[in-house]
Amino acid sequence: QVHNKPVDLQLKETSPTLGGGRIIHGRVMPGEKAGAYDLVEKMQILFVRVVKARELPHMDLTGSLDPYVEVHLGNYKMKTKFFEKNQRPEWDEVFAFPKELVQSSTLEVVVKDKDILRDDYVGRVMLDLNEVPIRVPPDSPLAPEWYRLMGKDGMRDRGELMLAVWYGTQADECFPSAIHAGSTPIDSHLHNYIRGKVYPTPRMWYVRV
């Protein structure tokens, strides 16, 4: 009865090249010697690591600031946790965007001040994704850099944000702990509990639906 189904609903066999070689008709055809990072079919992922900020401005009459960071990429928006009354917050959160979700050439990282009525805009960093480096273990981790935050008036006097942005794969050590785009509703705080799957070794078998 499978043959009576529409083509898109029929079973399809794939032949990915994994660590042990190429999978053909359910059997492993040995290939080149497998490395420790060649155990699954690779997916390209954009990683955005939001580390910390410094010299953030006072945003209200009390002089306090409750900062958090939004990462905007096309239609996707991810948020860090927020800190109460902190001009030098340290988040150290990593966000992961599978490359097929990347529909923009620009990444926008915005620092905001959490408020009861409406969150205030502090400053932003804009990055060109065409200039983002590719990093694959065992390459050394990409060192984060300080970026000046730009205000709505175009002035870069809103403090600094430390970021690291790179393209990697599931082999990246940040993958298991990263917060993955599309895993939770935009405004949900549950994203801190959503983690990527950790791939076991020496070989993983999986069904793609």
Image (cartoon, rainbow, N blue to C red):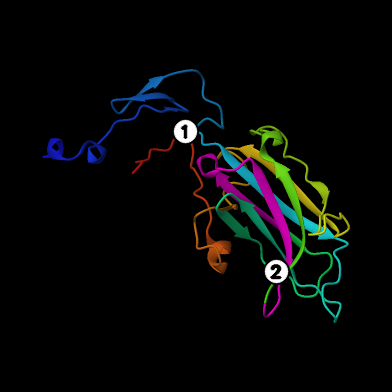
Front position in the image: 55 or 119: 119
Give the answer, above or below, for where 15 lies relative to 93.
Answer: above
Q: Could you tell me residue 60's position as x and y percent?
A: 82, 77
Circle 1 packing at 10 Å, graded few (<14), some (14-19), many (20+), is few
Q: Could you tell me residue 48's position as x and y percent?
A: 66, 48
Range of residues picked out in magenta = 92-117
Q: Could you tell me residue 206's position as x and y percent?
A: 37, 40
Looking at marks 1 and 2 on the same chain, the residue that comes earlier in the sequence is marked by 1
Q: Quadrant of the C terminus?
A: top left
Which residue is at 22% across, 38% downward?
10
The number of numbered discs placed on residues in the rendered structure image is 2
Give the answer, above or below, for where 149 lies relative to 204.
Answer: below
Residue type at the position of mark 1:
Glu
Q: Could you tell me residue 54's position as x and y percent?
A: 85, 60
Front position in the image: 19 or 16: 16
Residue type at the position of mark 2:
Phe
> Which residue matches tag 2?
82
Q: CA distance from mark 1 to mark 2?
A: 36 Å
Q: Quadrant of the N terminus?
A: top left
Give the answer, above or below, for where 197 lies relative to 45.
Answer: below
Between marks 1 and 2 in the image, the one whose residue lies nearer the viewer: 2
Give the answer, above or below, for where 176 lies relative to 67.
Answer: above
Horizontal side of residue 8 vs 20, given as left or right: left
Which residue is at 57% across, 68% downward?
189
Horizontal side of residue 173 vs 52, given as left or right: left
Which residue is at 14% across, 35% downward?
3
Query: Magenta span has 95?
Result: yes
At numbered mark 2, what does the secondary structure look like: helix, strand or loop?
loop
Among the 4 quarters of the image, the one containing residue 91: bottom right
> Which residue matches tag 1?
41
Which residue is at 86% across, 54% downward?
156
